[in-house]
Structure formats: C-alpha cells, structure tokens
C-alpha cells in the first residue's frame, strides 16, 4: 500500500450526516423519506464507536457512495412522483 | 384573520425567489405563525419588509421554548427536565450526531436553512434560538 490516506475528520463525518438528512428531506414519498432518515441515523450510530482509521475510512467512503445513491434516487423519484400523498403527510 | 393574509403574502414572496421545495417549508411556517396568533408577536414576524424595530437583543421566549421542546423530543427527556436557554446540548446528553439532528429538526420547524459553519458553532439552546431569530429576520 502507498501513503495512508488520513481518516475523515469529525467535521467531514458530521457534514456527511447532514447531507444525508438534507437529501432525505427532498423525497416527496413519506416512506422513502422516513427510511432514509432512519437508516442514516442508525448507520451513523452503529459506526460511532469505530476507532481503527482504516475501518473509519471504509465506513466513510461507503457512506459517500450511499449518499450518491440517495441523491440520484431523489432525482428519479421527483420525476415519477405519485399524485396521491401518503396519509402521514397530511397535518390536521 | 389578519395573521393568515399576512402570512400568505410572505409565502408568495418566498416562492417567487426560491425553488418550489421552499414552498413546503413556507407551508410549515404558515402553520407556525397561526399557532402563535394568540400572542402579540405575529405583527412582528409577518412583516416581509426588513423589520426596522427589531431590538438587537436575544431571541424571544417563544422561540427558546420551541427549541427546548424540540431538544426534549430529540433526546427523549421527560417533560419536567430542566431545559433552559443556557443548557448546553452536551450536558443534556447529546452527542454531535444528536446535535445535527436537532439542528435539522429546527430547520424544518422554523422553515430556515442553517449554514454548515453556523451549525457547527451551536452549543447551547440560546445559540440555536439566536441563530433562528437571525435567519427568520433575514428572510
């Protein structure tokens, strides 16, 4: 292996988390929006205690890839959004 | 009701300038302003012109209360737990991930958008409330 890449800093990780939550907000479908939020929160909590730099970097790059997937899907779903809103979205 | 017509003009000015996504946030803002219409503040919040008579002191108690309730909900604290303007998130048992979630919840509740750098400097409830007031008055 060549030079070791420094593991992501705290700020980068929090920024990635924030990007996940922001892109979750852009989904119009209630179920997918809630799932994205929940899955991001669970994953970050699960990996909170990692200390080995290589596993931290691996988790971070996996997270970046998933963020890319989420953003792409947000775009696709916005094109084919359902006309009927979920009942959970209606505030009385 | 005067408060509703005022907020609809605010919604119109928001939607002219920004994406349609902001419209859903403006809808939430509408719900918020109707909820506080019982008190004497709506005339201050609904003025779309830059508010000239805003005193440059700390945030209103209602904002602080709303921030406290969101913090309580996020950290699953009991209703009677002591959450005041001076409470630090870390002392309430929140780690940095919880802080990010709290800031997201505040963004959705107040219909604002917090910058990365500003979000990282929030440490107490009062910080959050002041930042919210600043962003709301800037709109």
Image (cartoon, coloured by chain):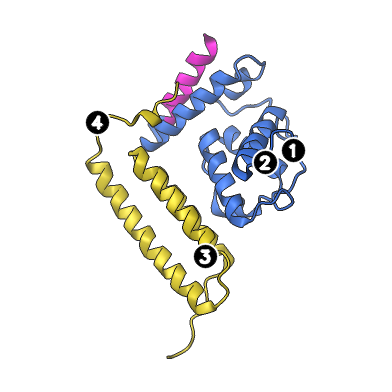
Chain colours: A yellow, B blue
A54 and B23: which one is in front? A54
**Residue at left 67%, top 36%?**
B68
Q: Predominant secondary structure in magenta? A: helix
Numbered disc in front, either 3 or 4: 3
Query: What chain does mark 2 sit on?
Result: B
List the residue tagged with mark 4: A83
For the N terminus of chain A, the image quarter is bottom left
> What distance separates the C-alpha of mark 3 from that of mark 4?
37 Å
Q: Residue furthest left?
A: A80
> What distance separates the C-alpha of mark 2 from that of mark 4?
38 Å
- The crowd level at tag 2 (other Cα within 10 Å; few <14, some 14-19, many 20+) is some
Q: Percent x, y for residue A42?
A: 48, 55
> What distance separates the C-alpha of mark 3 from that of mark 1?
29 Å
Which numbered marker is on residue B77? 2
**Residue at left 39%, top 47%?**
A35
**Circles 1, 4 touching at the beta carbon (< 8 Å):** no
Q: Residue B128 is drawn in which quadrant?
A: top right
**Circles 1, 2 touching at the beta carbon (< 8 Å):** yes
Numbered disc in front, either 2 or 4: 2
Numbered disc in front, either 1 or 4: 1
For the C terminus of chain A, the image quarter is top left
> What distance separates the C-alpha of mark 1 from that of mark 2?
7 Å
Task: Determine whether, in the image, residue B79 is placed left or right of residue A37.
Answer: right
List the residue tagged with mark 3: A47
Asked whether A12 falls inside the magenta stretch, the response is no
> What distance separates the C-alpha of mark 1 from that of mark 4?
43 Å
Task: Determine whether, in the image, residue B128 is placed left or right of residue A39.
Answer: right
Q: How many marks?
A: 4
List the residue tagged with mark 1: B81
Q: Which residues are magenta?
A: B1-14
Task: Determine whether, in the image, residue B46 is placed left or right of residue A87.
Answer: right
- The crowd level at tag 4 (other Cα within 10 Å; few <14, some 14-19, many 20+) is few
């Amino acid at each position: 292996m060549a030079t070791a890449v420094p593991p992501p800093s705290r700020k980068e990780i929090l920024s990635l988390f924030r990007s996940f939550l922001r892109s979750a907000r852009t989904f119009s479908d209630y179920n997918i929006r809630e799932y994205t939020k929940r899955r991001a929160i669970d994953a970050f909590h699960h990996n909170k205690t990692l200390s080995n730099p290589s596993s931290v970097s691996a988790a971070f790059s996996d997270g970046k890839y998933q963020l890319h997937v989420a953003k792409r899907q947000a775009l696709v779903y916005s094109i084919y959004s359902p006309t009927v809103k979920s009942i959970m979205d209606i505030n009385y | 009701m005067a408060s509703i017509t005022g907020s609809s003009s605010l919604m119109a000015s928001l939607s002219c300038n920004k994406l349609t996504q902001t419209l859903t946030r403006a809808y939430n803002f509408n719900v918020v302003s109707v909820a506080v219409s019982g008190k004497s503040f709506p005339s201050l919040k609904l003025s779309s012109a830059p508010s000239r008579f805003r005193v440059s002191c700390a945030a209103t108690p209602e904002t602080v209360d709303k921030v406290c309730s969101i913090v309580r909900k996020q950290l699953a604290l009991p209703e009677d737990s002591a959450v005041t303007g001076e409470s630090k998130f870390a002392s309430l048992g929140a780690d940095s991930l919880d802080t990010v979630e709290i800031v997201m919840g505040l963004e959705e509740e107040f219909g604002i958008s917090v910058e990365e750098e500003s979000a990282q400097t929030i440490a107490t409830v009062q910080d959050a409330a002041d930042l919210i007031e600043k962003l709301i008055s800037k709109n």
